[in-house]
Image: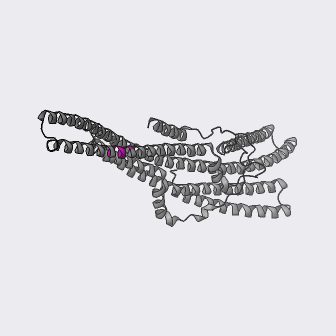
Amino acid sequence: MKKIYNLIILAVLMIFLTPINIYAGEVGSEVGGKDKGPIIFEDIENAILENNPMVLINKNVIRSMEEDYNLIEHIQDDVEDDRDDLGDAIDMMELQIKKLEQAKASLETKIDGDPDLINHIKSNYDALIGIYEYNKASLIASRKSLKEQQSSLVDQAEDMEDAINKFRVQAKMSECQLVWTAQNLYITYNVLRNKETDLTSQTELMEKQLEVAKVKESLGKITKADIDSLELQISELGIGLNDLRTQKNEILGEINLMLGNSYDFALTLDTELTPVYENFNERYFNKDLENVLENNYTVNLQALERETKQRILNRSNGSDNLSEEAAKYNLENEEIKLEETKRNVSFSFYKVYEDVISKKISFEQEKKKLEQAGTSRDYAVIRFDLGKISDLELKNEISKYQSQEINTYISEYELIQAYLKYEWMKSGLTL
């Protein structure tokens, strides 16, 4: 059992202490290569489950634990067979003792005459009976020891099964957390990509403004300080662009590692995201909450812990080594923890639910702003065609529309993120 518990502790530590940017061994082809094209959002889950090093490690840990459990079951069967054999041997001893006692009782009817001879033969029978009785007692003691060993093996098997069940839940929770993290990184990458587009557009517009400003400066209409201010703003936009590109590369590196690739593998991501939030219905909250509490991994782990304490209480009944009263208090504590866990999970789900509603309202507002920006852009095009505004002024209106278009995309991505959190909580995660 020491080996088993050490294995469990090691596995749990690997789940909760390993940082997300682990370095995986490069086995086989890397995921998302040019020959396979860009990874689409819908393929992330399967890609993680098939390639993530931690997921593969967890599967092997479970297999190892199952093999240990099978070994305990096999030993139990052997002990049961040995007990049956000892039972047969004890029955044989009792039969032989009975035969010897019958033979001893019939001596006087079979042997006439010398009492000394009869007593001598009786003493020999007594010696034989004593030997058989001693052997019988030894066999009974051995069978009792095997029974105790068998009882211990039953406890070990139950504990091992309990540990496997808990680790399965922990492993599944870890898998889902990895998938959600990868999805979150994927969406964040697209947000950064849009911000990069926006900053690039702003930079290009400001460079045009700088060209015009230099002409105005040469005509004495503005000062050198105005030029310096524009150049500083352009420089700051360049720094911002560089930061965004760095963040994008870091996200690609993280996703690569999660997929079992090398950090600098040339991974490409598709830019399309399905508007899954369309499935959201505020009226289903109470029903969804029931699913959350039923599927939640933290709640289920706590329920398994309560079962463990219940089993310990059952074992303590009549045990010299376990305190029944202490076991009752421990069980009561686990029941309190279970109810508290359910309340915390319910509150977390409520906050996620409220966040979806908030993000949905924000997205609708951004769409209205985009519509207004489109109207202003179209009006600017008409005014430009009539010669009432300059080319730079038109580009400024177009840039405003493009910025609002990107803000709308980002708002939609945030809504998708919020809705995915809602769905992941329904599937069992606590977010």
Q: Split into 4 quadrants, where in the image is the N terminus?
A: top left
> Percent position (x, y) of residue 233?
75, 41
For this view, does 94 lie left or right of residue 430? left
- Residue name at image x 31 percent, y 39 percent: 139
Observer able to see residue 57: yes
What kind of colouring is applied to the model shown? one colour
> Percent position (x, y) of residue 87?
32, 45
Relative to 222, say whether 278 is above or below. below
Most foreground residue, 105 or 311: 105
Relative to 387, say whether 314 is above or below. above
Q: Which residues are magenta?
A: 82-87
Task: Give the tally of numbered discs.
Answer: 0
For this view, does 276 lie left or right of residue 30? left
For this view, does 197 lie left or right of residue 411? right
Most foreground residue, 149 or 223: 149
Residue sticking out furthest to the front = 113
Q: Quadrant of residue 153?
A: top left
Most foreground residue, 158 or 407: 158
Observer able to see residue 336: no
For this view, does 67 lie left or right of residue 197? left
> Percent position (x, y) of residue 138?
29, 36
In the rendered image, residue 248 lying in the magenta stretch gets the answer no
> Percent position (x, y) of residue 370?
69, 61
Most foreground residue, 176 or 8: 8
In the rendered image, residue 84 lying in the magenta stretch gets the answer yes
- The secondary structure making up most of the magenta span is helix
